[in-house]
Amino acid sequence: MSGLLALLDDVAAIAKVAAASIDDVAAQATKAGAKAAGAVIDDAAVTPKYVHGFDADRELPIIWRIARGSLINKLVYLLPAGLALSAFAPGAVTPLLMLGGCYLCFEGAEKVAKVLGLGHHKEEAAEAMPEDPSHLEEQKISGAIKTDFILSAEIMTIALAAIPESGFWMEAATLATVAVLITAAVYGAVALIVKADDLGLFMAAKGRLRATRGLGRGIVAAMPKVLALLLIIGTAAMLWVGGNIILHGLASLGFAWPYNQIHHIAEVITGGLDQARGAAKWVLVAAMDGIFGLALGLILIPIGTRVITPIWQRVRRLNPVA
């Protein structure tokens, strides 16, 4: 009997350790996912365009296929690459993270420049509609998954840098959790955004109550504004996160002056506040990070459009989409 009780005690202890590990993974995944906010919001804002022009019954299957491709990008390619970097070349994480930060700044600044009509910005080429709709669908899905790979690489790199030093399996479990949760959140949100119009139209046409029909018409009318607001929030988040990554990276590489100056300015401005000083300081630091990200992005636009984009287009021509 005593042996059985001892065994039950051991099982209970193992269960407690397992539960603590799960809690640690969830906590680390939440923090790491929050760091990737800019790329996540941009991913959610960009993806709906890939289902534009298709029949309503094809929208959710297309989103599912893109989501599946995104999950493969993260779990099959980027997760092992991230773990290998962490194990064998941890010094490369910060430069890669800064490279991703530059990409976020570039994308955010390009969107701002396009709205303001400043300088050169990339134009979306009009695609000829293939005779076979299934071929167009394959093209859109392939393009979406390739775009997702870049954003997923940034998300996974940010998450990897945000994870505290821990064992191999803890890092693997945390990154896998981030990959699954972020993919579900992004493409679940995309599905809701894409189908909101259909829901609104259905409510407006079939609703039994006047309030239901009015709500349906309100949803249809509001969706363009919601999408526009999402793009604004995504752009601001990209500039903030990108600028913050670069400033932190510079500080960790020994050039801490910009990072220190921003925090010093925030301290001086909020020094006289008694209440909500911490919140006010955070807002100021985030705003200055975003301004820095915008300035850096505007500098990077000529490099991206005149050097990197032509090279990328040549690479894509060598491997055209089937």
Image: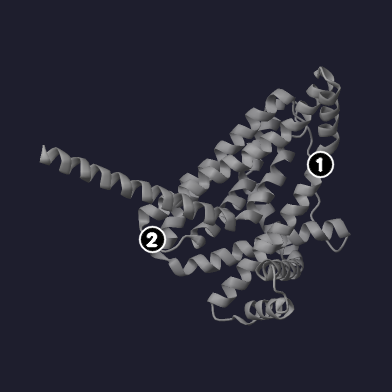
Q: Earlier in the sequence, mark 2 or mark 1?
A: 1
Q: Amino acid at mark 1?
A: Ala
Q: Which mark is residue 210?
A: none
Q: Is residue 3 left or right of residue 197?
A: left
Q: Residue at x 59, y 38 (%)?
A: 67
Tell me the colour scheme of the image. Answer: one colour
Residue 125 visible here: no
Instruction: Using the rendered view, name the quadrant where residue 154 is placed.
Output: bottom right
Q: Residue at x 64, y 67 (%)?
A: 244
State which mark lies toward you, 2 or 1: 2
Is label 2 in contact with label 1 (beta carbons under 8 Å)?
Answer: no
Mark 2 neighbour class, 10 Å CA radius: few under 14, some 14 to 19, many 20 or more: few
Residue with the mark numbered 1? 126
Q: Residue at x 74, y 29 (%)?
A: 54
Q: Position of residue 229 (x, y in %)?
A: 79, 48
Seen from this angle, which residue lies furthest front?
274
Residue 11 visible here: yes
Q: Is residue 9 left or right of residue 298?
A: left
Separation of disc 2 and disc 1 at Cα? 48 Å
Q: Residue at x 59, y 33 (%)?
A: 65
Q: Position of residue 257 (x, y in %)?
A: 63, 82
For numbered disc 1, what is the local secondary structure?
loop
Q: Amino acid at mark 2?
A: Ser
Q: Position of residue 102 (x, y in %)?
A: 65, 65
For numbered disc 2, what is the local secondary structure?
loop
Q: Position of residue 47 (x, y in %)?
A: 69, 42
Near-viewer residue (9 or 78): 9
Near-viewer residue (315 or 175): 175
Residue with the mark numbered 2? 166
Q: Is residue 9 left or right of residue 172?
A: left
Instruction: Using the rendered view, name the quadrant where residue 216 is placed.
Output: top right
Q: Quadrant of the C terminus?
A: top right
